[in-house]
Amino acid sequence: MNYTFIALVENKPGVLNRVASLFRRRNFNIESLAVGRTENPEVSRMTVVVDCPNGDYDAHKIEANLYKLVNVIDVQDVTRQPSVTRDLALIKIKVGPEKRAEVNGLAEIFRARIVDVAVDSVIVEITGTEDKIEGMIELLRPLGIVEMVRTGQVAMTRGVNDGVRRVQGVLGNRYEDVSELAEMAP
Amino acid sequence: MKKTGAEILWECLVREGVEVVFGYPGGANMPIYDAMLSYPVHHVLVRHEQGGAHMADGYARASGKVGMAMATSGPGATNLVTGIATAMMDSVPVVFVTGQVAAHLIGGDAFQEVDVTGITLPITKHNYLVTRADEIAEVVREAFYIARSGRPGPVLIDICKNAQVEQTEFIYPEDVKLPGYQPVDHAPKDSLERAVKLIEKAQRPIILCGHGVLVSKAEEVLANFAVKTQTPVASTLLGLGAFPASHELSLGMMGMHGEVHTNMAIQNSDLILAFGMRFDDRVTGTLKTYAPHAKKIHIEIDPSEMHKNVAVDVPLVGDLKTVLTDLVPMVDEYDHDAWLKEISGWKSEADTRNIINWPDDGKLYVPHLIANIWKATGGGAIMTTDVGQHQMWAAQYYALDKPNRWLTSGGAGTMGFGLPAAIGAWFADKDQEIWAVAGDGGFQMTAAELTTAVQEGANVKVAIMNNSFLGMVRQWQEFFFEKRYSAVNMLSPDFVKLAEAHGVPARRVTKREEVNEAIAWARKTQGPVVLEFVVEQEDAVYPMVPAGAALDQMIQRPVK
Ligand SMILES: Cc1ncc(C[n+]2csc(CCOP(=O)(O)OP(=O)(O)O)c2C)c(N)n1
Ligand SMILES: [Mg+2]
């Protein structure tokens, strides 16, 4: 199952490399990783989606290992928290003028936008959850997708609720003892 | 006042208490070496950067302080890599400083440019690439703090040549600012209470004492806990010395070459108290059948070790000494006489197979030699080892009552560690007797450091256990590859002549009756000494848990 983590990291050179290298070394499979600035110039925010075949057991492992990186400030698992998740895709479709209307119709249904029109192609921009984007891609595929790019998922919990912190409280210095984890070990 | 980056580096190192640096100069760190001359730091010129890394590591393990090694860019830095990985695997605090080409040349494949921070990313606790002089003070401050706190480990600082020569205002940072780095000290009360409940119920408890006990300086509180609850203490390879081997509750070493009764006790226990250890595969055997009846309490500072290899019932993340100090008043006194008796039953059975109890057949066996060195030194020497059979025998027969005298590469198993680690340890305490036990194979990996020992007058005694084989690999080929010996026959130089060519007095010992005299001679000879013991070639380390077998499925020494 895919888990979604939000990691706050120090905005310093090489931190993305450290995180990526850690996932590789500990043998975790990243499904998507998006990184960008936050309201605080010293902090970057990563949304990482990782396949966790052993459920919360793997999630604990990921959190604990992320904290081994000196530059990682906070990690929360928002998989089961009510949250807003978004992915953005740009999709180039090879269509001449005769089929543009069809693309237009689809775009409208998905609340996507056509952001570029050329003689023999159009670019569609779609923002939404993974599912929505996958759905649109399925329908566009028969028309001939020639190029596609996606930003990877970003996430934000709704309201004031945070995600789960299994390893460390917000202020650090406390290990959250989740006793059921032992039963989930592979 | 304005200073160069190189001067700032030394200002900071001196403030961190660095007294000795093991290193090697080259193009990319010449400004650092030039500035060094003005500072009260002793520099040890090593013969190979790997040796320097192990020396800094040995110094750190013996002193409890942060070790320090240096190298130039490119090949100098890559030569450190094995030593860095060795320190990482055993959580040893060492700060490495490497020179790097000038910042504007980075990425251009300049002469002796190697991406050292890239290479060492997975084998350091943290590393830095410094491109400007004004970064140095803060980085050095952080590096030492990170290396020694929490779960200790190596930190590398790669300093570009321009940063070494640029001038900048020197301001020593009073504090470190690391928002994401907050090692936990206390474990929460509710978790402690859950642990106490398990301890109350236990009939067959056992403590697994790891390196963390030494790192956290928790020896005394561990002993208090063990005595109060009458819980026997088994040790990992790196935990040896944390609990006195002569204590009645001591079970000695566990694991692949651990004692029979110790492994039996683990497999039959109903509560495992894992203190500062990480359930390495060398101590658990196959996980499928590991301690099947035991509940598990794990005290460990690194949360990523929780449930990593063995899922535990109560994870207590925190500084071991702090957590144990909180825990001791919460537990009652118990007695586990029946359990302790059962364990000694297993022990007396195993004793008959112990080669140390066998009659003299005229040959030299490493266990005897270790026991002889133990007797001569009263068990009080610092003992460093290389890796292989002799290492396991040293662990089994050099019974330690005191902490921080056992220096061995456990996690990485790095051959060549013994001699340089001993030299490093000598700088930690020059009055302390130091022995390095090495195999004929491993000794040759870093033998060039003999000259370093001579140049420094390091008073280290090297015992080479020469079995003319890469013995541990030979043993595996004997047991698991139908004795098809492949690439394990090792031709060695004449070790006595080799030592003498380095200016080191040396003797070869081939008979039992020469052993004690030779050891006595080595002890009273000032400075480095080499003893070569020509030992039985095809002896094997027993007991042995084959890789992947259950912990109580041990191959035992055949009875004659
Ligand atoms: C650098 C390195 N290379 C290879 C090994 C694999 N290895 C482990 S033990 C061993 C044999 C060591 O032989 P020797 O130093 O003679 O010691 P002995 O086992 O004979 O006591 C080898 C090759 C290792 N641990 N380290
Ligand atoms: Mg050998």
Image: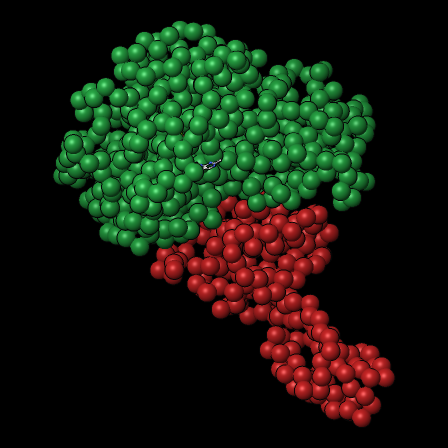
Chain colours: A red, B green
Query: Percent from the top left, x then y, of residue B522?
Result: 39, 10
Tell me if residue A184 comes above or below residue B515 in the rendering: below
Tell me if residue B219 comes above or below residue A65 in the rendering: above
Quadrant (top left, top right, bottom left, bottom right) of the C terminus of chain B: top left
Quadrant (top left, top right, bottom left, bottom right) of the N terminus of chain B: top right
Query: Percent from the top left, x then y, of residue B233?
Result: 28, 35
The residue under the point 81% across, 40% down is B104
Left or right: A68 in relation to B293: right
Query: Percent from the top left, x then y, of residue B7?
Result: 74, 23
Residue at the bottom extreme of this rendering: A98
Marks counted in the figure total 0
Q: Quadrant of residue A154?
A: bottom right
Query: Percent from the top left, x then y, of residue B471?
Result: 37, 33
The answer to whether any part of residue B126 appears in the image is yes
Q: Nearer the viewer, residue B118 or B216?
A: B118
The residue under the point 49% across, 42% down is B184
Left or right: B196 in relation to B149: left
Tell me if residue B249 comes above or below residue B182 in the rendering: above
The residue under the point 56% across, 55% down is A23
Left or right: B367 in relation to A72: left
Ligand 1 occupies quarter: top left
The residue under the point 54% across, 46% down is A68
Q: Nearer the viewer, residue B550 or B66?
A: B550
Q: Nearer the viewer, residue A44 or B305?
A: B305
